[in-house]
Image: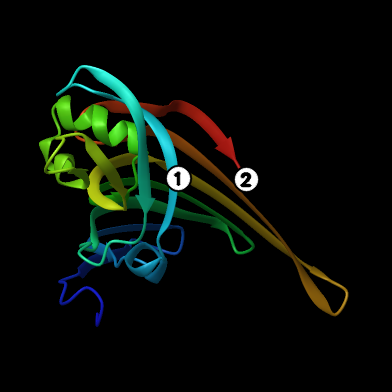
Amino acid sequence: YSTSGSVASWKLGGSWQVNDVLRFRATQSRDIRAPSLDELFSGASSANFNVFDRDTGTSYLVQSVSSGNADLDPEEADTTTAGIVLSPLPNLMMSLDYYRISVDKAITTFQASAIVDRCYGGQPQLCDLIVRDPDSGLISYVEVSPQNLQSMLVSGADFELSYSTPLGNGELAVPSLVSYVDTLELDDGETVTQLAGSTDQPT
């Protein structure tokens, strides 16, 4: 990528057709997402917010400057899938697939106040986004830009049912898909947020 340099991605998959009715399939891959142009190069905008400065023990008004981050790295994900496909009738197909996706270096943007709080709360890498006045020592402004600071884990299963039958001069196909999300966690380096668990999500 001209904006993000070189990355390595790969995929290994296999499919075993046992007979006309039963088929197994599985894949393992390393997937990537390069930062978007907006995440890299969006223009700067500013706003004011009230901050509690732990260095001085006082609260005062500070400027936040939002912009892109040209130093972002591509997101990386390890993806595992495994499934079974059944075709008990020529016009009926059923499949069940398990998936697990673990994303590292996910891109996220914290609010200015959260950057200050997290700097003192166990994420010192965010302290570089806080710019202080060399004379007064007070915070001059906070840089609000995307960072590679989040990881994500999602797992679940997809069930698909497809039925087709002749209709006039053509064919009528009726597909159906149900997705079951077992785990959906976001880890921003400070807290792990469980966004979903054991929920059916039909589509």
Residue shown at 26% from the left, 19% from the top: 58
Q: Secondary structure at mark 2?
A: loop
Q: CA distance from mark 1 to mark 2?
A: 40 Å
The residue to which callout 1 is attached is: 47
Residue shown at 26% from the left, 54% from the top: 79
Query: In which image quadrant can residue 13 be found?
Result: bottom left
Single out the mark in the foreground, 1 or 2.
1
The answer to which of marks 1 and 2 sits earlier in the sequence is 1
Closer to us: 192 or 200: 192
Residue shown at 29% from the left, 40% from the top: 153
Looking at the image, residue 121 lies above or below residue 170: above
Relative to 84, is 15 on the left or the right?
left
Expressed as whole percent of the image width and height from the top left, the position of residue 22 reads 41, 56
User: Looking at numbered disc 1 in the image, what kind of residue is underneath it?
Assistant: Ala
Expressed as whole percent of the image width and height from the top left, the position of residue 81 reads 31, 52
Query: In which image quadrant can residue 9 be found?
Result: bottom left
Does residue 187 appear anywhere in the picture? no
**Disc 1 packing (10 Å; few <14; some 14–19; many ≥20):** few
